[in-house]
Image: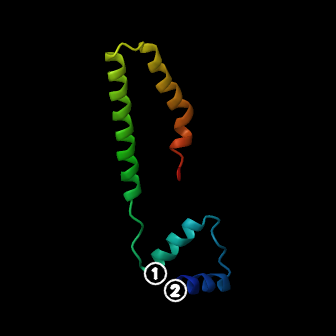
Amino acid sequence: MNAMEELLQKDREAGIPEAPDPAYTVAALKKRLGQPAASHQEDDVDKHLLIGAGATMIGTAMVALLLGASPWWLLAVPISALILGPYLLRKGA
């Protein structure tokens, strides 16, 4: 971390303003130091989680229909997805 702090100190002395986003600053410093960029493994985990959730919902709906539940209750799934989707898919959730 000392190398990053030294680069930040040199930038401050040179009058370069800091970026408002700390993640951008860290990524830029890592790039200047020659460190590898962050991997996109988190995105793959999100895809697998969404696929698993979708498969679980489809399976639950099929079992409920086979047991004689009214198909009208299936409207709750897309309505709740429309309401909760943006909150759940927000970055960092």
User: With respect to residue 50, does 69 lie above or below?
Assistant: above
Please identify, in this view, whether the residue under mark 1 or under mark 2 is nearer the observer.
2
In this view, 7 is above or below 69: below
| Closer-to-camera residue (18/65) | 65
Residue hosting label 2: 3
Cα distance between the residues tagged 1 and 2: 8 Å
Mark 2 burial class by Cα count in 10 Å: few <14, some 14-19, many 20+: few
Q: Where is residue 20 in the image (x, y as percent from the top left)?
A: 65, 65
Taking the spot 46% from the left edge, 74% from the top edge, the residue there is: 31
58 lies left or right of 93: left
Q: Position of residue 14 (x, y in %)?
A: 65, 84
Residue 74 coordinates in the image, percent (x, y)? 44, 20
Q: How many marks?
A: 2
Find residue 17 and report its image quarter.
bottom right
Precedes in sequence: disc 1 or disc 2: 2
Q: Which secondary structure lies at badge 1?
A: helix
Task: Check the image and report above or below for 68 versus 77.
Answer: above
Q: What element carries label 2?
A: helix
Q: Nearer the viewer, residue 69 or 56?
A: 69
- Identify the residue at horizontal 39%, vertical 41% (top origin): 50
For mark 1, what is the residue? 33
Is there CB contact under 8 Å for labels 1 and 2?
yes
Neighbourhood count class around disc 1 (C-alpha, 10 Å): few under 14, some 14–19, many 20 upward: few
Q: Which residue is drawn at 40% across and 14% down?
A: 69
Residue type pointed to by label 1: Leu
In the image, residue 6 sits, relative to residue 28, either above or below, namely below
Q: Which amino acid does label 2 sit on?
A: Ala
The reply, left or right, for residue 68 in relation to residue 87 is left
